[in-house]
Amino acid sequence: MPPIRPRGSLGRGAHERILTAAETLFARRGINATSMHDLHVEARVSKRTLYQHFAGKDELVLAVLAAQQEGGATAVLTRGELAPRARLLELFTALAEQPRPLRGDPFVNAAVEFPEPSHPAHRAAAEHASRCYTTARRSAPSWRTIPPAPPTPTRSPPQSCATRSTDHATAVARTVGGGPA
């Protein structure tokens, strides 16, 4: 595959460039399909600099996920100026405004690419999902009780995870909207 960016370093700001490059390439290609070589070329840093900032790819994946937690669903669900129902609807509005083709949620992608529950990226994704769910339940005290999330099996294929998520989203929509989804 040809280099993504022309060669040459840009000096200061390597850490942020590495995170931005990782976020872009992980979304475009997938985590497992992106090599550290691709990352150093895209971020325009030397491999030495890349490994000075991140000991390995797993550490970089966790840093990208940690940076993603600052925004996304958690940020929308904690917006105080919106009514509880508007917060939930804003999640879907934000999704509709994302550039096409949609590449998926980075946490879901990490959980799918690292299906072993003991992997740090999978654990980070599961913890993020739990935090979002808890935040959604707390942000809407006027709603009827949101159905509890389905239990997470210790290991399941991505299709069953998607089916469980869709079924749960439908149940939440019925509860919030008061009618069929």
Image (spheres, helix red, strand yellow):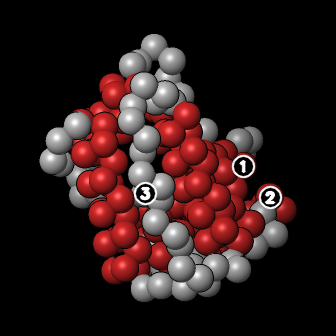
Task: Label 1: state its secondary structure.
Answer: helix
Instruction: From the viewer's side, name the closer residue of 62 and 49.
Output: 62
Image height of 87 relative to 13, above or below: above
Quadrant position of residue 81: top left
Badge number at residue 15? 1
Residue at image position (22%, 37%) is 178
- Callout 2, which amino acid? His
Badge number at residue 45? none
Whether label 1 touches label 3, CB < 8 Å: no
Foreground mark, 1 or 3? 3
Q: Residues within 10 Å of mark 3 (few under 14, many from 20)?
A: some
Image height of 100 relative to 151, above or below: above
Instruction: From the viewer's side, name the closer residue of 97 and 49.
Output: 97
Whether label 1 touches label 2, CB < 8 Å: yes
Residue 154 in the image, given as x and y percentages of width and height:
59, 82
Residue 137 in the image, given as x and y percentages of width and height:
51, 39
The residue beneath circle 3 is: 105
**Counting residues from the N terminus, which is met first, the one under dot 1 or under dot 2?**
1
**Counting residues from the N terminus, which is met first, the one under dot 3 or under dot 2?**
2
Badge number at residue 53? 2
Foreground mark, 3 or 2? 3
- Callout 3, which amino acid? Asp
Q: Is residue 74 left or right of residue 97?
A: right
Q: CA distance from mark 1 to mark 3?
A: 22 Å
Residue 174 in the image, given as x and y percentages of width and height:
25, 45
Task: Label 2: state its secondary structure.
Answer: helix
**Counting residues from the N terminus, which is met first, the one under dot 1 or under dot 3?**
1
Residue at image position (78%, 63%) is 54
Instruction: From the viewer's side, name the closer residue of 128 and 84.
Output: 84
Q: Is residue 29 left or right of residue 64?
A: left
Q: Residues within 10 Å of mark 2 (few under 14, many from 20)?
A: some
Q: CA distance from mark 1 to mark 2?
A: 7 Å
